[in-house]
Amino acid sequence: MAAATHLPRLRLLLALLAFFTTVIFAQQAALPLKSSSRWILDANNQRVKFRCVNWAGHQEANIPEGLDKQPVGYIVDWIKQQGFNCVRLTYSIDHALNGNTMKVADSFSQAAAAAGVPAPAMTGLYANVISKNPFIATATTRDVYTNVVDTLWEAGIMTILDNHVSKATWCCNLTDGNGWWDEGFGYNSWNSRFFKTQDWLTGLQTMAVWATDHPGVVAMSLRNEIREFLLQGSFNGRADWYRFIKQGGDIVHAANPDVLVVVGGVQSSTDLTHVRPKNKMLDTSGWAGKHVWEMHAYSFTVTFPDPFQNCDAVKAEYGTFSGFVLEQNKPYTGPLILSEFGVGMLGGSENGLNAQDDRYLKCLVSYMTSNDADWAVWALQGSYYLRDGNVDADETWGLMSHDWKGWRNEKFPGMLGDMWKVTQGP
């Protein structure tokens, strides 16, 4: 009699469990992903469109930002609720090489010393991190990445791992030492002193191997905003770009054949024109069926000037320098993700934007919508543990408020219009 009484409750619990299991896993892409012509497809040959947000973790503390403000779960839930299906998660080669053994407590202490800020300031931030995320008290920095990536995937959110810099610091300029391979032609310390080519290759391999145990990592970007300075790059036909990008892609694919390999051009991921001429395509045979291009575009990007406030002219620039890779049936055809774009959230007369950013964003949204291309907006973070020597620095381009509770500008997601939609496919 007692068993019969409890049977309906048991059935209800099983039904609820089945429902929530279905909801969770139905939202996960069928893996592994692959590239076919200009499309990213899942294991069932259905199109997957990346609608991502950047989440920085490449600075001195070497863990994803914001964990002093909110628990990992809160941030992941917020990302999911806004409709993003992936995160472009940045990391440094410092982290790649040392993350397995570097305790977060030690990382925060070393960050203070590296940036020349008072140790108590970082100690206070670390205490807040532990308060919001108790598991970090005994964690390495790699453990934190593991927790973030796995929590994202449990919510159905994919991760693109992006090697943002070699030395953990803010990016980017032509004198930060992270711009071009130190083994390349035309070495100069301003742009290359930290970009140790062999460490970079080892770091990519290390992160690719680690990602094999974390299926939510569906893609790896080889390097953020590769940039030439002085004699580098253009003086030898960008031979170093071809050589080292091929080495990096080959290493990642050998270590983890499931992930997509994401490649940006030169001039800070804005210029892919060198692959367009006949017989100049990058050799991607080492990661066939896994290749994805990326580009960046901001209102201040010098590759895409807008002196006459003419959107058609700017769209032509986007197409000429990077967007042409979406042309089908070409040697260079491939998916293209706009992996960084964004606007200042300081306020203004145009839905909280200034006139320049409003004009830029409307034009970019029009271009992206007409091409139905993949994207990742900069940036999630409302603050940084440390940036340019400033503790608890505000990110005025951040989607989230400084306290990481919600939107900094609630009108922004609506400004992306039909970029959220999937309107084209193979």
Image (cartoon, helix red, strand yellow):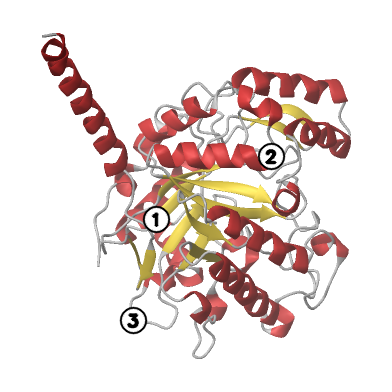
Disc 3 to disc 1, C-alpha distance: 19 Å
> Image point 54% across, 59% down: which residue?
220
Q: Is residue 15 left or right of residue 171?
A: left
Secondary structure at numbered mark 1: strand
Give the foreground label among 2 and 1: 2
* Sequence-earlier tag: 2 or 1: 2
Task: Please report contact status of discs 3 and 1: CB closer than 8 Å, yes or no.
Answer: no
Where's residue 352, x and y in %?
A: 47, 29
Tag 3: amino acid: Asn
Where residue 379 sits, quadrant-wise, is top right
> Image point 78% across, 32% down: which residue?
108
Outermost residue on the bottom side: it is: 279
* Sequence-earlier tag: 3 or 1: 3
The residue carrying pointer 3 sits among few (fewer than 14), some (14 to 19) or many (20 or more) residues within 10 Å by Cα, namely few
The residue carrying pointer 1 sits among few (fewer than 14), some (14 to 19) or many (20 or more) residues within 10 Å by Cα, namely many
Task: Please report contact status of discs 2 and 3: CB closer than 8 Å, yes or no.
Answer: no
Where's residue 156, x and y in %?
A: 37, 41
Tag 2: amino acid: Thr
Residue position marked by numbered label 3 in the rendering: 329
The residue carrying pointer 2 sits among few (fewer than 14), some (14 to 19) or many (20 or more) residues within 10 Å by Cα, namely many
Tag 1: amino acid: Asp
Disc 2 to disc 1, C-alpha distance: 29 Å
* Sequence-earlier tag: 2 or 3: 2
Locate the N terminus and report the quarter of the image it occupies. Answer: top left
Q: Nearer the viewer, residue 77 or 252?
A: 252
Secondary structure at numbered mark 3: loop
Residue position marked by numbered label 2 in the rendering: 141
Residue 348 visible at all: no
Residue position marked by numbered label 1 in the rendering: 374
Task: Please report contact status of discs 2 and 1: CB closer than 8 Å, yes or no.
Answer: no
> Image point 48% across, 61% down: which residue?
259
Q: Is residue 13 left or right of residue 65?
A: left
